[in-house]
Amino acid sequence: MHKPVVDHKKCNHCRMCRLLCPDLALTLNEKEGQIQIDLDFCKGCGICEAFCPKEAIKMELEK
């Protein structure tokens, strides 16, 4: 199974991933200013990776 990993250096917080996630697994941590992924809800569909305009999300194989 794959899981999304965010490259916070590339992410510009456009929130496109949050809008498109069918599992509502992505949130913006206002305090840290970073997108966070709740892997308890994420099903690994890859929509966030496919639509990220900055290519800041990559699907990686879970270990």
Image: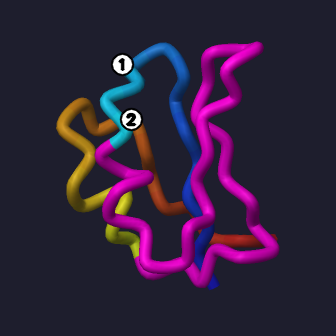
Relative to 21, say whether 51 is above or below: above
Q: Which residue is mark 2?
A: 56
Relative to 53, say whether 63 is above or below: below
Residue 51's image quarter? bottom left
Q: Residue at x 67, y 20 (%)?
A: 30
Q: Residue at x 36, y 19 (%)?
A: 12
Q: Are marks 2 and 1 in contact (CB under 8 Å)?
A: yes
Q: Which SS class for mark 1?
A: loop
In magenta segment, residue 40: yes
Q: Nearer the viewer, mark 2 or mark 1?
A: 1
| Residue neighbourhood size for the residue with mark 2, other residues' Cα within 10 Å, grouped as few (<14), some (14–19), many (≥20) | some
Of the residues shown, which amino acid type is indicated by label 1? Answer: Asn
Residue 20's image quarter? bottom left
Of the residues shown, which amino acid type is indicated by label 2? Answer: Ala
In magenta segment, residue 34: yes
**Magenta-highlighted residues:** 16-45
Location of the N terminus by quadrant is bottom right
Q: Residue at x 73, y 14 (%)?
A: 32
In the image, is 60 to the left or to the right of 51?
A: right
The image position of residue 3, as x and y in percent, is: 61, 67
The image position of residue 38, as x and y in percent, is: 74, 60
Q: Which residue is mark 1?
A: 12
Alpha-carbon distance for marks 2 and 1? 9 Å
Residue 53's image quarter? top left
Labels 2 and 1: the sequence-earlier one: 1
Location of the C terminus by quadrant is bottom right
The image position of residue 55, as x and y in percent, is: 28, 38
| Residue neighbourhood size for the residue with mark 1, other residues' Cα within 10 Å, grouped as few (<14), some (14–19), many (≥20) | some
Q: Residue at x 37, y 59 (%)?
A: 48
Relative to 5, say whether 12 is above or below: above
Closer-to-camera residue (62/40) = 40
